[in-house]
Amino acid sequence: MLDSSAQPAGLVLDGIARSYGGTVAVADLDLTLPAGALVSLLGPSGCGKTTTLRMVAGFETPDRGTIRIGGQEVTGLPPHRRNLGMVFQNYSLFPHRTVAENIGFGLRMARMGRAGRDAEVRRMLDLIQLPGRGDAYPSQLSGGQQQRVALARALVVNPRVLLLDEPLGALDRSLRESMQFEIRGMVTRLGITTLLVTHDQEEALSMSDIVAVMRAGRILQTGAPSEIYDRPATRFVAEFLGTANIFEGRVAAGGSALEIPGAPALPFAGRAAPGSRASLSVRPERMALGAGAEALDIRLDVRVTGAVFRGTYAAYQVEAPALGRELFVYRQADGPLGAVSFRLGESLALGWKAEDAVLLAPEPAE
């Protein structure tokens, strides 16, 4: 865990809100970024995450609420007085300037001397693994190299907070994955508080210390990536962060199982009011097929209706007659590449542990 007890939080958003006419873009949002943490705002298009970023940057003014960076209120300050670094999806490099000139632009605007500026540029070129490429132009670099230059330009001014706006969206999958590691490693080594805006679930989960899931201008859940994924608070969070099998019914007497007509009771961790409507979420990888399902808390008879190989695991679609529906199950690959363990039409047992059935809270009113 990050220990921020000896210093103020890197960034605090306290009740910030922004509306355009009668449309609420951000509704009384609270978020704290511990100093040195990488925090992701994750959500679909139109959820308010970019508006939130623009308010932090100073490009938008909140209708109400305050923004503090390192303990200092900056709500009314213009962008150039907030000491922020920003990296955009399109990089925004100057095509007519060299790599060194792009990286050193902020230092030049700050009137740093030539010798000091050159030294800082060389340091950043080493950091982004492009030593000796200072004389190149952006058009002579690959997409990943251009992204690293944009990152170096943002970091060279030693910002108090780094803002990343969908920074990897323009890259292909393999390059995007390698850049996730590079950016994560770089901001961790430098200890810079970072706010990442993305709609890519994998990107948020793999890069972040903390993930804040947004919908309709509100944060639905904030926590460590594993917590958000394994213990989603609402159905939206469960389904937005990957595949989830959702079960709906009424809470049985005793308050720790879900009753669905015609099906065995589905126990879950935690308690709920008996007789109340409730929903459960179970991740496909938490389910077991075949012999491994026999001794688990929940057991159903199912039939395999679909099987797809996905590299390190196989994805199965199974029909559960007792539930009158199909479910998705993931099983780690345990045979030759391309092989699946179960055949179409095969009947077998499906099961999971009660602790992996997550009780979901009702969706907040929009």
Image (tube, grey):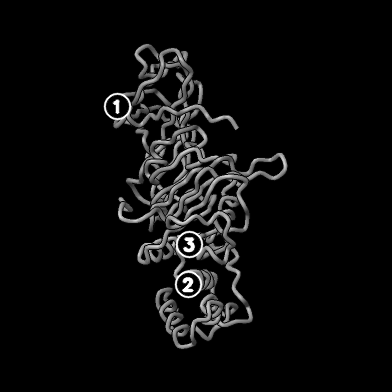
Q: Work out whether 282 lies above or below 27.
A: above
> Does residue 33 appear anywhere in the picture?
yes
Q: Residues within 10 Å of mark 2 (few under 14, many from 20)?
A: some
Q: Residue furthest left?
A: 295
Task: Give yes or no for contact between labels 1 and 3 (Cβ–Cβ under 8 Å).
Answer: no
Dot 2 lies on which element? loop
- Look at mark 3 in the image and give the residue it sits on: 162
Q: Earlier in the sequence, mark 2 or mark 1?
A: 2
> Mark 2 or 1, which is nearer the eye?
2
Amino acid type at image mark 2: Val
Q: Earlier in the sequence, mark 1 or mark 3?
A: 3
- Look at mark 1 in the image and give the residue it sits on: 296
> Mark 1 or 3, which is nearer the eye?
3
Which of the two residues, 208 or 110, is positioned nearer the viewer here? Answer: 110
Q: Residue at x 37, y 11 (%)?
A: 253
Q: Which mark is residue 157?
A: 2
